[in-house]
Amino acid sequence: MARVGDLDQRFTPSPTALEGMIGHNTVTSRRPPNYQTEIPLTGEYKNIFVRGRADGYDPDSNQLEEIKTFKGLLERMPENHRHLHWAQARIYAWLLADERNLEEINAALVYYNVSSKDEFPLSELFSAPELEAYFAEQCEKLQTWADREVAHRLARDKQLATLKFPHPEFRTGQRFLSEAVYKTANRGKCLMAQAPTGIGKTLGTIFPLLKAMPRKKLDKIFFLTAKTSGRKLALDALEVLQESNPDLKLRTLELVAREKACEHPDFACHGESCPLAKGFYDRLPEARIEALDRGMMDKDTLREVARKHEICPYYLGQDLVSWSDVIIGDYNYYFDLYAVLYAGTVINEWRVSVLVDEAHNMIERGRKMYSAELDQFEFEHMRQSAPKAVQGTLNKLSQAWIQLVQDQEAPYEVYSVIEEELHFALQRVVTRITDYLADRPTNNDAGLLNFYFDALQFVTLADSFGPHSMFDITRTERRSNLLHENTVLCIRNVVPAPFLKGRFEAAQSATLFSATLSPSHFYSDMLGLPDKTPFIDVPSPFSPEQLKVQAVDHISTRFLRRKHSLMPIVQIMAKQYREQPGNYLLFVSSFDYLDQVYTLFSERCPEIPTRQQSRLMNEAERQDFINRFTPTSTGIAFAVLGGSFGEGIDLPGDRLVGAFIATIGLPQINEINEQMRTRMEAIFGQGYQYTYLYPGMQKVVQAAGRVIRTTDDRGVIYLIDDRYGQTEVRELLPAWWEIS
């Protein structure tokens, strides 16, 4: 209620939680013996209950103190931050005065610089009546908003209790999925659901969870996905629900990345630079109400409302997180190291349920979230022009780095621990740059800032380093005036489970769903799901007659046999196309292999239309590649398995009638993957399966899933590799397939 003024997102390093705790203890240790600390306070105003904990109170001087730790220069603290601090101090002062029947009280802000150890107290004497009036004023402001929120929650829950399914009947498998999600939510558990394309997974998970919201007193549903297409499916499903339940009062928010929402990418995020940051908090309340009244707050709606009220659309969306019922966004908003939705859940004690769309992507995404990398060449380049104030610690880090790698002869090596001298040197660098940036928050070199954030991530992960991750160093040739050889230090996450486990525990319930979640123990182990998390395999709506699956297991696509496979693959493709012209996709394991097959096919079958995925396709080129699959077109498109066209594209009917998959999708055998295999073997006892087989076959099934998209589709799949004859491989293919 007390927020006013500009939005100011200039980077100003703040004390860590530990530094803040030490700072508070230092200040209170300087006080008299009868000084009271951590005083719980409560108060009521109409139907508003207020609670908090004051930092300290000195009964001799009758002074309540609110302690704020900081770094840098106090005068650089934004005025609106100071305004909020005073609001907090006044509210606490009134609650204490009311509890102890004080006629007046000193309220003090004590700013403590964790670097210099100096205190900067600001004190003001208030009478009890004026504090009571201020408390009432803030509560009255909140009252209007609180009444709206209570009314919305009551109406929402009443309508959700009688929510109607938007179609006359469920699709095959959709009811089974919905019932499982509903039961899971009511039991407060986790669920893994393997559900094929075509049953309406998105609606089949959102609808039952909305039905469960009133009974489980859920505050929010988080629908998390890896791709923009997944967000759109969720928004479309909610639109359909809204149309069939016109009285439904549901607030749906779409979160997008800042770079995609920003109206002025060339301006800095503060009132002195960006007009949409100037006076942001003064115009926010009206914009917030209008956005919430719209109900469906997708990115286009947020932009429209933000433009009308002349505020930043991205930070409008961030504010609306607190007031929305369903939030749709990328995995990182809940699962990464600094996830805003997870932080909000913990701090505000929200009761949330999490839906994880296309959950097979979570392993690789989780690894990236909890990995960190430092490049020596980039570091040395930055060090040459770094400010003198940080040169000393950077030089020591450079020495520690050189000393660490000087004895490594192999191009790639994994270390059992992160060497202490390097760790300490990095910690000192982070601390020194933090202090420097606190004193000089603007006009800093991009190279310094980029290294700082990379180093901060590295140090954070180094503090929790364990068997779930590897520390490795890669040496490469780089002839320059800075280095003869370059090294890259990497904390490489192997098993994201230890990091993700707490995220799932914070939710009231969670459902992970995908067309490929087999074997279930692999995903449960890797993602840190609770023990005995149930797994369901939703029956397919498709019949074996719709899809002809042929295993060509007399051809090997292994690297050493690859040249012998080219002509047989070309012959199979040409024969199938000539018998049944249409749109086909070929998937192989690498771009080099793709080039070889494409070249030979073009020479032998020049009359058949072809096109080829290139290594560096931009978004427009990828979309053009997909758009050329039309109901009237014919030809064969050549692509790499696991790339842009192996999942997440929808080509129903004659847009795609068949696929040739000339690989079993195993990740490349290299030093990194072999080290990961060793680690997986040590942890799970299934190194080959967890590192190679399961991730590879997941890509195969996803790619094959492009062929049959609806109950009216017909198609053919060729599985080309001798390993498709192995029982272990065939068991990972969909049960409804009949393979000949």
Image (cartoon, rainbow, N blue to C red):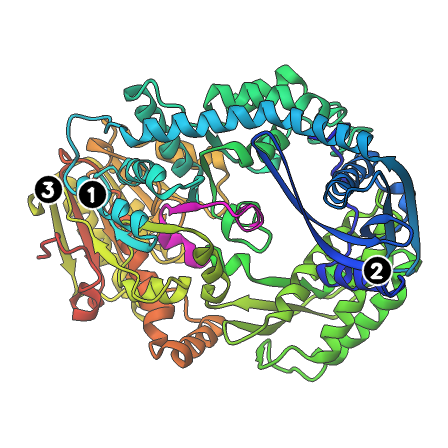
Q: Amino acid at mark 1?
A: Gly
Q: Nearer the viewer, mark 2 or mark 3?
A: 2
Name the residue beneath numbered marker 3. 546
Query: Does residue 362 show up magenta in the picture?
Result: yes
Q: Is residue 43 left or right of residue 384?
A: left
* Label 2 with label 3: CB-CB less than 8 Å: no
Q: Nearer the viewer, residue 252 or 665?
A: 252
Is residue 325 among what the camera can see? yes
Q: Nearer the viewer, mark 1 or mark 3?
A: 3
Name the residue beneath numbered marker 2. 35
Res 122 quadrant in image: top right
- Residue 658 is labelled as 1
Q: Nearer the viewer, residue 194 or 573?
A: 194
Q: Secondary structure at mark 2?
A: loop
Q: Secondary structure at mark 3?
A: helix
Res 305 quadrant in image: top right
Q: Nearer the viewer, mark 2 or mark 1?
A: 2
Up-down relation of residue 230 to residue 501 (above or below): above
- List x then y, in percent, for residue 688: 34, 74
Q: Nearer the viewer, residue 657 or 496?
A: 496
Label 1 neighbourhood size at 10 Å, few (<14), some (14-19), many (20+)? many
- List x then y, in percent, for residue 46: 59, 29
In this view, the residue farthest toward the top is 308
Q: Secondary structure at mark 1?
A: strand
Is residue 595 among what the camera can see? no
